[in-house]
Amino acid sequence: MALFAATASLTALSGCLADDSGDGARQETALRLDEASPVGVSNEFSTPVDAVDHAGRAAVRTAVDGGEATVSGYYAPGVSAPYVVTDDAEYYRVRTETVHSVPATGYAYTVAVDSVDSFLLGPPSSVPFADLPEHDRDAVRDAIGNASLVHAPHYPPFEVTFAYASAERRERSRFVPGNDGQRVEWDGELLRFAFDGERSAEIPTVAVRADRVASSQGGFRRAVGEARGRSVEGLTPDQRAILDATIESEYAEVAPHSDAFAAVIDALSTDEGVAPLVRYDGEWYFAHLDRPD
């Protein structure tokens, strides 16, 4: 819990107007607080389990269902937000830990995506995606993360590396060793694989754990606020005036900052910068702090 101690009068605050130097760079420090609704906090800090990238989706589901999961592969499981949420609004904090890793040779490709229907005289010969070995299919899905992206208009070329610790998988792969010019038809799209060369690779084995933190959006907001937020109280009138001015708006000062503004910034700051959530007068807000360029 953060306490403020500055005593300067708001009407006497120094430097509260922006510097009009005209060089295009921001000269003032600006603070803004925006409403942090339960839905907004859920969207900001959690990812639906079904939206976890392909490399970690099955492991996260297993962990959420109560077991510790492990997954091995060149593409280690990753979660874009520190928490995941299930369809029934159960929230879990996900942790990953590399248990061990083994060296391997990776075979890197650049993959271009064309629509099968874009060829006037018909597409060139290709292999159906379903005919690839499962581990090759998984490598492509892992590299993309979200398979639906291949259907995006003018989807840019992406990179995929096929690297396997298992000799059996290497022998069955269509991409090991390098196989330049391979074409694969996948759900109406033609993937063209251009071999880029061999790479040294590590194949990690990653443990995935999930701890339930809340069973509702409101409970999740409280949990995130307690873990990463700041509560403010014991405010002087000048400090309250500054915070009131930041709600759904912006309060800015150029250096040197007033004592009250400096105290506000200090109270909302963490080792990683300004706290992402702030509780003030019983309400939660997203905090945004912009410093001079």
Image: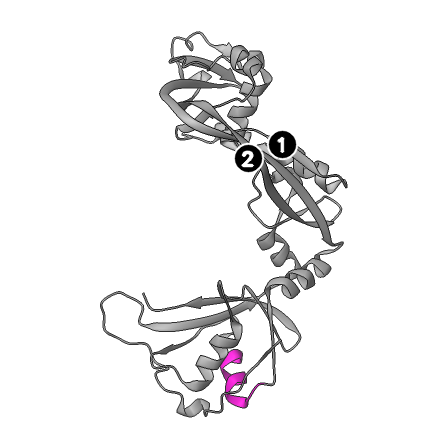
Residue 80 lies in quadrant? top right
Image quadrant in which the N terminus is located: bottom right
Q: Is residue 66 above or below residue 175?
A: below
Residue 232 showing in the rendered view: yes
Identified by mark 1, the residue type is: Val
Residue positioned 26% across, 65% down in the render = 24
The residue shown at (53%, 79%) is 244
Q: Secondary structure under badge 1?
A: strand
With respect to residue 22, does 60 lie above or below?
A: above
Q: Are marks 2 and 1 in contact (CB under 8 Å)?
A: yes
In percent of width and height, residue 246 lies at 49, 75
Q: Is residue 182 above or below residue 90?
A: above
Q: Quadrant of the C terminus?
A: bottom left
The residue lying at 64 percent from left, 72 percent from top is 283
Q: Which residues are magenta?
A: 235-245
| Sequence-wise first label, 2 or 1 | 1
Residue located beneath label 1 in the image: 71
Residue 132 vs residue 184, the one in the foreground: 132
Whole-number angstrom distance, CA of label 2 to CA of label 1:
8 Å
- Which amino acid type is shown beneath numbered disc 2? Ala
